[in-house]
Amino acid sequence: MPMLAPTKRMHDLARAVARLTETRGFPPTYAEVGEQLGVGIARTRDLVKQARTRGLIDQDDGVVRSLR
């Protein structure tokens, strides 16, 4: 099955993660990313999962603040 292209919202998520990481010096939490995107933690979690499967961002399983 072909991999689907990332959506605009997933690109927004990746930019928010990069911006917050650069500004603060460490990766953001889901709550911090969600605040930037104007969505809740559950929606942020869904977007992260989708973006990970499409190779747009990475995260260490079970490790907080590991979005990159």
Image (cartoon, helix red, strand yellow):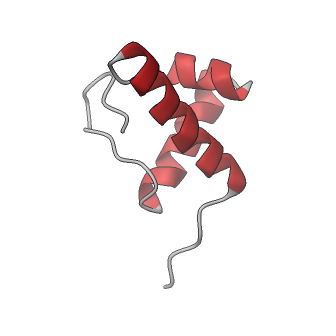
**Residue 67 vs residue 63, the one in the foreground:** 67
- Is 9 drawn above or below residue 31 in the view shown? below
Reply above or below: 55 against 3.
above
The answer to whether any part of residue 12 appears in the image is yes
Q: What is the residue that sits farthest to the right in this orientation?
A: 38
In the image: residue 7, left or right of residue 56: right
Residue 15 x/y as whole percent: 56, 40
Q: Residue at x 26, y 30 (%)?
A: 62
Task: Quadrant for residue 29, please give it.
Answer: top left
Please indicate, yes or no, whether residue 46 appears anywhere in the rendered image. Answer: no
Residue 27 vertical placement versus 9 (above, below): above
Q: Residue 12 location, x and y as percent?
A: 64, 42
Across and down, in percent, residue 37 comes to 69, 29
| Of the pair 14 and 61, the residue shown nearer to us | 14
Identity of the residue drawn at 31% across and 22% down: 64
Q: Is residue 53 left or right of residue 40?
A: left
Numbered marks: total: 0
Query: How far across and how far down the image is residue 25, in percent?
Result: 33, 18
Outermost residue to the front: 23
Quadrant location, the C terminus = top left
Camera-nearest residue between 56 and 1: 56
Residue occupying image coordinates x 45% and y 18%: 23
Tell me if 25 is positioned left or right of 29 in this view: left
Which residue sits at x=60%, y=50%? 11
In the rendered image, the vertical position of residue 62 relative to residue 29, given as above or below: below
